[in-house]
Image (tube, rainbow, N blue to C red):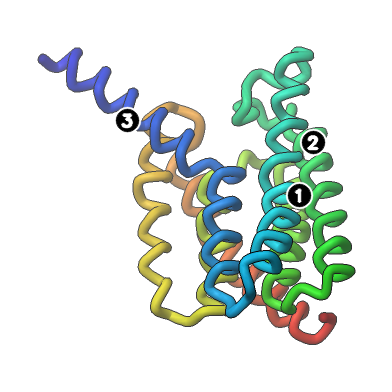
Amino acid sequence: MVREEGGFQVGLAKFISAVLNTMSFALISFAILVFSKEFNARRAAQLFSISVLFASALPTLFIWSLARAGRVSGLYVPKREERTLPLAGALVSYTVGVTCLYVADAPPDITGMMLAYSLNALAALIISQFWKISLHAAGITGPVTALVYSLGSCLAFLYLLVLPVGWSRVKLGDHDAGQVIGGALLMIPLTWAWMELSAVLF
């Protein structure tokens, strides 16, 4: 019974980690933000497609290709020393996404959330040189902060998603509690600052 319970918990942790990883939650976050705006269907589809391409699809494809080539140990890049290349690739993708959204004349908060992804990736890249910050936790609280900034505190309940995500990362042995808490808390003030910056820039 104990062994079965442990197996269930590990399976649940793997499921949560997969469903709420950084790239998949980017898709969810941009869907909430884009489709909450009063766009016509064509305009919404355009901005959502750009956002998902550069915030989710391309970074995922890049990490998958690195994993296939043996450059990283897995899709979640479990080894800290392997993070530089995946994060650099994501940083490039997010930055191109900012440019494309700006050219497409997207609202400042949509472009701003992409900018937050870019600058948060840069912060994570720097921190990962010496500490294994939880990207899963950061990938929840960062975009949720952008959503709260743009759409209001009614979405603050989404911060609660970091609880099952944090539990799953610790349960799977990929992070300790400090790395999860650090990733979760750091991205809140950083993202808020980037959204404020985007309001000025865009």
State which tag comes first along the sequence, 2 or 1: 1
Quarter of the picture holding the N terminus: top left
Query: Where does the image place residue 28, in percent across and percent down from the top left?
Result: 53, 54
Q: Is residue 55 visible?
A: yes
Disc 2 and disc 3: Cα gap in Å?
A: 29 Å
Q: Is residue 65 above or below residue 134?
A: above
Query: Where does the image place residue 123, in percent across and percent down from the top left?
Result: 74, 55
State which tag comes first along the sequence, 1 or 3: 3
In the picture of the structure, the residue carrying the numbered disc 1 is 54
Query: Where does the image place residue 111, in percent across and percent down from the top left?
Result: 75, 69
Point out the frontmost of discs 2 and 3.
3
* Residue at image location 56% in from the left, 60% down from the top: 31
* Residue at image location 71% in from the left, 19% down from the top: 67
Question: Residue 69's image quarter?
Answer: top right
Q: Is residue 61 above or below residue 40?
A: above
Disc 2 and disc 1: Cα gap in Å?
A: 18 Å
Residue lying at the far bottom of the rendered structure = 200
| Residue 84, disc | 2
Quarter of the picture holding the C terminus: bottom right
In the picture of the structure, the residue carrying the numbered disc 3 is 12
Disc 1 and disc 3: Cα gap in Å?
A: 29 Å
The residue lying toward the viewer, choosing from 10 and 180, is 10
Query: Where does the image place residue 116, in percent across and percent down from the top left?
Result: 71, 64
The residue lying toward the viewer, choosing from 121 and 175, is 121
